[in-house]
Image: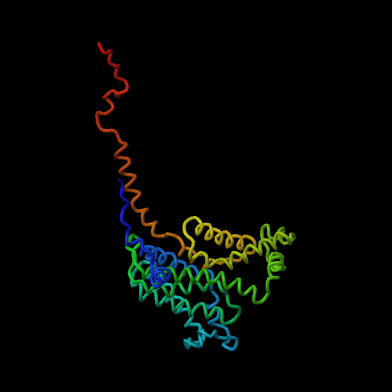
Amino acid sequence: MRTLPAPRRDLAPLSAPERLLSFWAPDLAVARVAWLRRIIYLFVILDVTFMVTDPIPHGDVPVAIYRPLLVRRLLHLPAPSHVYVRVLFAVIVVSALVAAAGRLPRLAGWVCAFGMLDWLSNAMSYSKIDHDHFALVLTLFVLPTVGAARVTDTARDRAAGWAVRLVQMGVVASYALSAWAKMRFGGWDWANGATLIWALSRRGHGPGPWLASRPPLTHAMQWVVLVVEFCSPLMLWLRGRALAAYVLFWCGFHASTWVLLKIHFLPLAVCLLAFAPLERLGDAGSWPARVRALRRVARPRPGDGARPPAASAAPSSGR
């Protein structure tokens, strides 16, 4: 009689505290944090050099138009000056390069995080406040908590999982709070309004003017964006192809805003990489060895060509 195997204890249901811990600090490969560091810190250099460049001219304008954000008042950050903003730029670039190289991950990471907070709050103390950098700033403050990490480190650690989870929470909050803001100021009528038509008429590019002349289509697009924004917390529980489809939707959405309106959300889009299994990129290093091994197997041995193939031998007559 066939007996069933004994139930494994490691498959027993988790207790409530264990489920809470596994959600906020899942066991993830340390390599994912290492890859995030390389990408995020290099993006920071791109960001301060070509995207958010307002702090440099802010150092040369009258202080009277400076209206510091609450975070600057709480941290007692000084008003921008000609020398201050240029030194800050150099500090951010150098610390980002050091952190991207995996050197002094905690020290360089904290310096870069506080430097970017100073830089971005400077940029937004003179005009509107953008929400596309929220997830990026949060990422910069959680990456230094992990410590040393290599792209080939396959060890799983809860500290890495906690950092990645917070980055994911920042991304989800950016989308969900955007939907809440639409409801706060526009209500459900926002989806049937002319927000997208106004934007496409004002700064439309490519097929933008064509879309602006078709209200039913723009209303449908607004409803899709609103529903997907409200459902963005599902990204924290989705896995596999469902999660990949959600992330790809947002990538397509951000690409479309650039094509149609020349508005990008690159700081937020880069943080979407926290949902990707970046640790698998470390396997690429083994491909050259695999290719060489396949070549050795496929290469014929000396003298093999002189031997007739076995299939060409005459069959035995049996006599």
Q: Residue 170, position in %: x, y?
A: 49, 71
Tell me what residue is drawn at x 44 percent, y 67 percent: 40
Q: Viewed as shown, does residue 167 lie left or right of 309?
A: right
**Which residue in the rendered view is the most extreme toward the top?**
319
The quarter of the picture where the C terminus appears is top left
**Which residue in the rendered view is the most extreme toward the front?**
1
> Is 207 situated above or below 314?
below
Pick the front one: 217 or 183: 183
Tell me what residue is drawn at x 48 percent, y 64 percent: 237
User: Please, which colouring scheme is shown?
Assistant: rainbow
Q: Residue 163, position in %: x, y?
A: 41, 71
Indicate the quadrant where residue 98 lies: bottom left
Q: Viewed as shown, does residue 96 lie left or right of 289?
A: right
Indicate the quadrant where residue 277 lies: bottom left
Number of numbered callouts drawn: 0
Q: Residue 227, position in %: x, y?
A: 61, 65
Indicate the quadrant where residue 13 lies: bottom left
The quarter of the picture where the N terminus appears is top left
Q: Residue 279, position in %: x, y?
A: 39, 59
Tell me what residue is drawn at x 57 percent, y 83 percent: 61
